[in-house]
Amino acid sequence: MKRLVAAAVGGAVAVGTVPVVLSSLGFTGAGIAASSIAAKMMSAAAIANGGGVSAGGLVATLQSVGAAGLSMSSNVLLGSVGSAFGAWLAGSEKGKETPSSPPPACPEAEEDQPEENVPEVEPPKAPLKSDEHDK
């Protein structure tokens, strides 16, 4: 039940905040607001494109959404993503630790494995002594 409520809230918040955020950035129904982040974005895009803002670019798309709102399909997609995110957040529960069981003990497997950082090389053998070198 908790996840269902969180999913509903997440979807509603996602759809409801887009117009508010775009408006606060300066993408309004009357156009781009002066001295806003949107105006700075438009200026940068115009300078980059040699004096004009390209159709279909980020600034043009955000202005279109700010003026007319999102289409129905965009609202459905945004609501679905917001719902999934809300349900995921409700299921994560950071404060609750779930006890984990230790891995099963398997003595046969432990014996087959070499110990960590222990080389499997024979130690060097002592040189053979000969009588010729002692004289």
Image: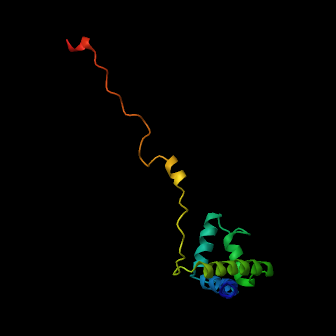
Nearest the camera: 79 or 120?
Answer: 120
Q: Which residue lies furthest to the front in this view?
A: 107
Q: Which coloring applies here?
A: rainbow
Q: Which residue is drawn at 72% across and 79% down?
A: 78
Residue 40, image x, y percentages? 58, 75
Whether 39 is drawn above or below 48: the answer is below
Residue 88, image x, y percentages? 64, 78
Q: Which residue is drawn at 24% across and 14% down?
A: 133
Figure quadrant of the N terminus: bottom right
Nearest the camera: 11 or 22?
Answer: 11
Q: Image quadrant of residue 92?
A: bottom right
Residue 88 in view (yes/no):
yes
Residue 31 in view (yes/no):
no
Residue 120, image x, y percentages? 44, 39
Numbered marks: total: 0
Q: Residue furthest left?
A: 135
Q: Image quadrant of residue 84?
A: bottom right
Q: Which residue is drawn at 73% across and 79% down?
A: 80
Nearest the camera: 9 or 111?
Answer: 111
Tell whether 67 sits left or right of 120: right
Figure quadrant of the C terminus: top left
Q: Image quadrant of residue 66?
A: bottom right
Residue 93, image x, y percentages? 56, 80
Nearest the camera: 23 or 116?
Answer: 116
Q: Residue at x 44, y 48 (%)?
A: 115
Tell whether 55 sits left or right of 129: right
